[in-house]
Amino acid sequence: MPTSEATELHLPCKRHKRMGTLQAVEVRVARALAEYELTGDPTYQASACCSVCGEPSYYTYNEILNFMPVAWRPQPLPESHGWTLLLIEVPAAEHLTERYLFGERLLVQFEFNDNEYWYGTLRSPSGMAPSMPLGSRIGGNYLSGTPIVTTWFPEGHSKTIPVEWPAPGTQDIGSFFIPKDAPDTLLTANLICSNPSCGRFFSYNYSQLNQVLDEQATIGLVSHVKRILTITCPKCQTARVVDEACINSLYKL
Ligand SMILES: [Zn+2]
Ligand SMILES: [Zn+2]
């Protein structure tokens, strides 16, 4: 198995394992494409042509994963862990029909969660509430199915989260909107990384993704042309596929 020191890796040709590689697509992109295609076709195998013999090789999702260095593979979250969202409102113009918020994903080990409330232990550092230490007991409610952080329980008391305005250049912040006439609805303007253990948002918004989609309509590996693109997480390097339905699910910025 290759080591994670390489910056990019290509799957080997199954006939010429020492010489030929499937140059058309990098292994992380191949994984993302297989993950995407398997949702519609459970028999999907990634394929591309060999740089030496020109013949195609076919790879299942697990074969692709096994070829990747362990550090490059998406990692599942530990049991009972999940991502919550800490929000801070951006002062927006009065005439807007939505409230505008910045949000940071915080990893929590849940002790309790039902459809209305949750509480648990903070397992990732917060850039928006840096005075709240790892291991803090926190809780909250839900907006559109997403657990929202509202309360900190230091030494058994309950306290509003000490949220600070994100410093310029702060990473891992997404944009969110709550319609003023539908206060239980949370709309998101950014996609999340497809690695379950990564809390990163992609900074591209609806317009930017549409522009890239128009410029980059095909990807080497897929034989049939689809309007999809792949984006790579700057934090964990996991690639994900973005299609039009995915872009259309975003708040239109
Ligand atoms: Zn070959
Ligand atoms: Zn990531």
Image (cartoon, grey):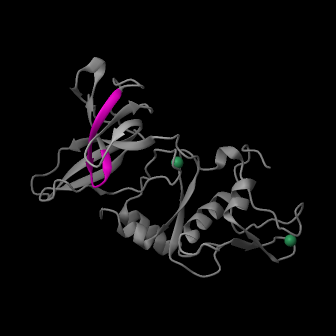
Q: Which residue is nearer to you in this view: 44 or 55? A: 44
Magenta stretch contains residue 145: yes
Q: In the displayed structure, would residue 166 be above or below residue 207?
A: above
Residue at 28% x, 49% y: name it: 115
User: Residue 229, position in %: x, y?
Assistant: 52, 68
Residue at 46% x, 40% y: name it: 81
Q: Which residue is nearer to you in this view: 103 or 166? A: 103
Q: Is residue 193 visible?
A: yes
The reply, left or right, for residue 3 in relation to residue 220 is right
Q: In the displayed structure, would residue 74 be above or below residue 41?
A: above
Q: Main secondary structure of the magenta part?
A: strand
Quadrant of the image containing the C terminus? bottom left
Residue at 32% x, 50% y: name it: 146
Quadrant in the rendering for residue 46: bottom right
Q: Residue furthest left?
A: 94
Q: Which residues are magenta?
A: 137-147
Quadrant in the rendering for residue 160: top left
The quarter of the picture showing ligand 1:
bottom right
User: Residue 41, position in %: x, y?
Assistant: 58, 75
User: Residue 225, position in %: x, y?
Assistant: 57, 81
